[in-house]
Amino acid sequence: MAALREKYIVDGKGKKSEVILPIEKYNELLEDIHDLGIIAERKNDKTLSFDELKKRIK
């Protein structure tokens, strides 16, 4: 795993207020958020057992 190369922007009091990320990491985070949204939308969907799935595929 590559080390994260984030940089911070601080306000006048030295408190971190923003972060700068490599674009690749930013895109990964957006993908993760999208995936989590899909999971949340489908959390109440009916599930299938592995055997039922195999039957439907055949």
Image: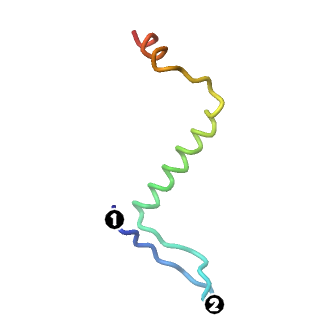
Foreground of the two, 3 or 49: 49
Q: Are marks 2 and 1 in contact (CB under 8 Å)?
A: no
Residue at the far left in the pictured view: 2
Quick check: 30 left or right of 3? Answer: right
The residue under the point 49% across, 14% down is 52
The residue under the point 46% across, 17% down is 53
Residue bearing the label numbered 2: 12
Q: How is the image coloured?
A: rainbow
Tell me, for residue 58, which label it has, or none.
none
Q: Position of residue 24 (x, y in %)?
A: 39, 60
Q: Position of residue 5 (x, y in %)?
A: 40, 72
The vertical placement of 34 against 41, above or below, is below
Residue bearing the label numbered 1: 2
Q: Position of residue 22 (x, y in %)?
A: 41, 67
Image quadrant occupied by the N terminus: bottom left
The residue under the point 52% across, 43% down is 35
